[in-house]
Image (cartoon, rainbow, N blue to C red):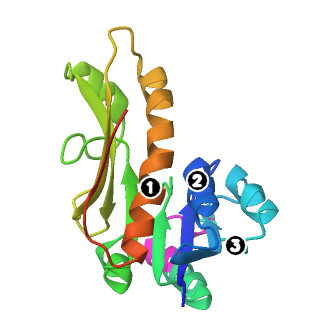
């Protein structure tokens, strides 16, 4: 029985596409839902083109009512009955109460070598710190922001002429390799870490 995967996005969904493309016939999991908080997210059309059910829980009508937004989000996920939730560029911070409902089933990809540079602007902060390497991390989601157990990391060298934008662009293909590799292991109940170098 394949594990059921819901993927949460807010934008173009490039990591979502990488995850879905990897879930072939021999994969231990299958995509059952792509959900976005943004009705204009480009990834929704990509998911629909790949034959995956999509839904939107727009956060904007819930301004000042995070509990209401998360209740709607939770209901949409319960309806899809996922075994695993992959956050893939989902740009909403989730509360501890919501995370507790799905803890142990929820993964996230973060564009830094955690525990370095939690939060936003990771590429710029990596360059400002004079790092020789940069990378990305897939981790289990816990109530601590970007603080859950690390399941895999990918590393690229920082080049002398890097800007935040081109560093991000060079890292993206590694994200597209790392996240599917981690999901494949996670869905197989294999807890060995994935490590990739460019």
Q: Which of marks 1 and 2 is nearer the N terminus?
A: 2
Observer able to see residue 145: no
Q: How crowded is mark 1: few (under 14 residues within 10 Å), some or many (20 or more)?
A: many
Is 23 placed above or below 67 here? above
The residue closer to the viewer here, 151 or 181, is 181
Q: In which quarter of the image is the N terminus?
A: bottom right
- The image quadrant of residue 192 is bottom left
- Whether pointer 2 and pointer 3 mark residues with C-beta atoms closer than 8 Å, the reply is no
**On the image, numbered disc 3 is attached to which residue?**
55
Per the rendered image, the range of residues in magenta is: 61-70
Give the SS element for disc 3: strand
Q: Which of 148 and 177 is in front in this view?
A: 177
Q: How far apart are marks 3 and 1 (CA)?
A: 22 Å
63 falls in the magenta region:
yes
Specify the label residue 18 is tagged with.
2
Residue, far top: 161
Residue at disc 1, secondary structure:
helix
Most extreme residue toward the front, as rendered?
Answer: 26
First of labels 3, 1 by sequence position: 3
Give percent across and percent down for residue 79: 61, 90
Query: Label 1 belongs to which residue?
Result: 179
């Amino acid at each position: 029985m394949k594990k059921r995967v819901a993927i949460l996005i807010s934008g173009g969904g490039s990591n979502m596409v990488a995850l879905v493309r990897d879930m072939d016939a021999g994969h231990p999991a299958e995509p059952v839902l792509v959900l976005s908080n943004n009705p204009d997210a480009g990834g929704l059309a990509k998911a629909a083109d790949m034959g995956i059910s999509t839904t939107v829980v727009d956060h904007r009508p819930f301004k000042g009512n995070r509990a209401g937004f998360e209740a709607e989000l939770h209901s949409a996920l319960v309806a899809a009955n996922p075994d695993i939730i992959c956050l893939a560029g989902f740009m909403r911070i989730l509360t501890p109460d919501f995370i507790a409902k799905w803890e142990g089933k929820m993964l996230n990809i973060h564009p830094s070598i955690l525990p370095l540079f939690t939060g936003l602007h990771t590429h710029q902060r990596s360059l400002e710190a004079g790092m020789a390497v940069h990378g990305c991390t897939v981790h289990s989601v816990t109530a601590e922001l970007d603080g859950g157990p690390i399941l895999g990391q990918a590393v690229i060298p920082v080049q002398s002429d890097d800007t935040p934008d081109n560093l991000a662009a060079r890292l993206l293909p590694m994200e597209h390799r790392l996240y599917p590799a981690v999901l494949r292991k996670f869905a197989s109940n294999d807890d060995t870490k994935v490590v990739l170098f460019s």
